[in-house]
Amino acid sequence: MNSIRLDEKSFWEWMSLGTSVKEPEKNDFLPESNRGYVHLLSLMMQNHWESIALGKHGGGSPKSARTLDHLSRHIPRKYLLELQFCLAAYGSVFATLFPPMLSHLDNLPYIEWLLHMETDHEKYRDHLVHMFRVAFVCNRLMQIKAIYQKAGEFQFSSEHFVGWCKERLNTDPGGWDTTRKDRILCAAIYLCAIFHDVGYGYYFLSQYRQRLAGVLPVLTQGEATADIHHKDMTNIRNSLGAKYAAKYHHSLQENESAAKKEVILSGFFRDNLGLNHSVASGLFLVDLADNLYDRHAISDELYVAFHLAAEAAMLHDMRGNDKRLHLSSGACGELLDFERQREVPISTLLCFADNLELGNRPRFRKEIEDEKCTFCMDDGEGDMIRMKFDKSRKCLTIEPRELINKNNFSFIFDSEKACYVLFDIPINKSDSNS
């Protein structure tokens, strides 16, 4: 049976040392570390050597240091160090893609601090470190040759993807050589993993606006809950994710006029933006891709990879009925059914990796004892997440199978084989350090 190892030691080696343990059937084209993926992105930049020259990041700013200092009062030191390390890793990615993005690097720890302090969401799980962990899981999954082969086969024959490439770039993916497909596939999976939760802060922004409307309705009356500029909306309507939305939108007919199609797609993104955190993540990637492409900073290959990543990020939090509007029944709720995997294999891979990583993800909570309030972290107990409410800890924990069913992952766990299944391929997960 295919097997992947997801222990802490391997993850931090993958993040920092530039090396990783050689897995059986490892695909030679796969980068062996996080640094390898950053180097792959630099190779796909239009001005490769300029990207390398500008891609030196000198560390955190005083503003980030102050934010992390505040955060250190509420989270364990172990996680704070992980946070600082991953923040530096994001700096390397930003510097490689577009150096001016470094000016926004301070926003990442600030958003993480804001979400940890959110009073109505005390069971918040980290996202900044988590996204790199998901990238690591994706890398491990892609080392299984059968998964890589099916992911590539499905992606480059996906009907709406092929149609988007022909319309947007006047090219047919079927004619691309294997090396080009490998680069695009690797870059897309990495980008969707490290950015799939960046829109989480927006999820709370819409809630804050609603609260303010109850206090100061005069000042908030004219503000849309989800405001998108007209120019940005044009880019969004031309995205790969919009192509998927058009295919399954219950109000969009095949012979719809261009003007009506624009209105319907604009409404789809506006209405869904406040319901989940994944649409905002997808829009971030679309905006970044188009800005870089308009500046001739990235190649066609990387542009395609960005849009594949944006589509995957957009879909990953839209599976629940309360997390989406306007899509026909089953378009996302059955996203991981085998037939749906053929249309959006990268999104399927992201959802699968996100689910596998969830078990070891730290959960932060408040604990009140002797009239003192402190923040604590639950590391979990391996893969076991218990289904009970612990009064002393005030924390609800759930069995993996219950969690899987809750998130429409019921197909993933094969009880007879006692293993996970991706692309109809059985996988055994190990967290052992041995």
Image: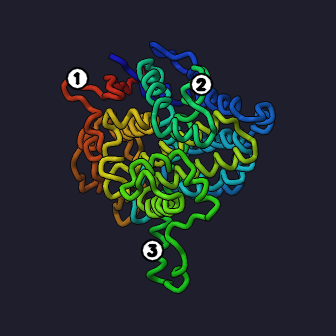
- The 10 Å Cα crowd at callout 2, few under 14, some 14 to 19, many 20 or more, is few
Disc 2/disc 1 C-alpha distance (Å): 37 Å
Q: Amino acid at mark 2?
A: Trp
Disc on res. 176: 2
Residue picked out by circle 1: 417
Asked whether 119 or 279 is in front, the reply is 279
The spot of residue 116 in percent (x, y) is 47, 57
Residue picked out by circle 3: 210
Q: Is residue 313 visible?
A: yes
Q: Are marks 2 and 1 in contact (CB under 8 Å)?
A: no
Work out whether mark 2 precedes mark 3 in sequence or the reverse, and give the earlier one.
2
**Which residue is pictured at 46% across the width and 51% down the height?**
278
Q: Are marks 1 and 3 in contact (CB under 8 Å)?
A: no
**Which residue is pictured at 47% across the width and 30% down the height?**
157
**Secondary structure state at the residue bearing disc 1:** loop
Q: Are marks 2 and 3 in contact (CB under 8 Å)?
A: no
Disc 1/disc 3 C-alpha distance (Å): 48 Å
**Closer to viewer: mark 2 or mark 1:** 2
In this figure, which colouring scheme has been used for the structure?
A: rainbow
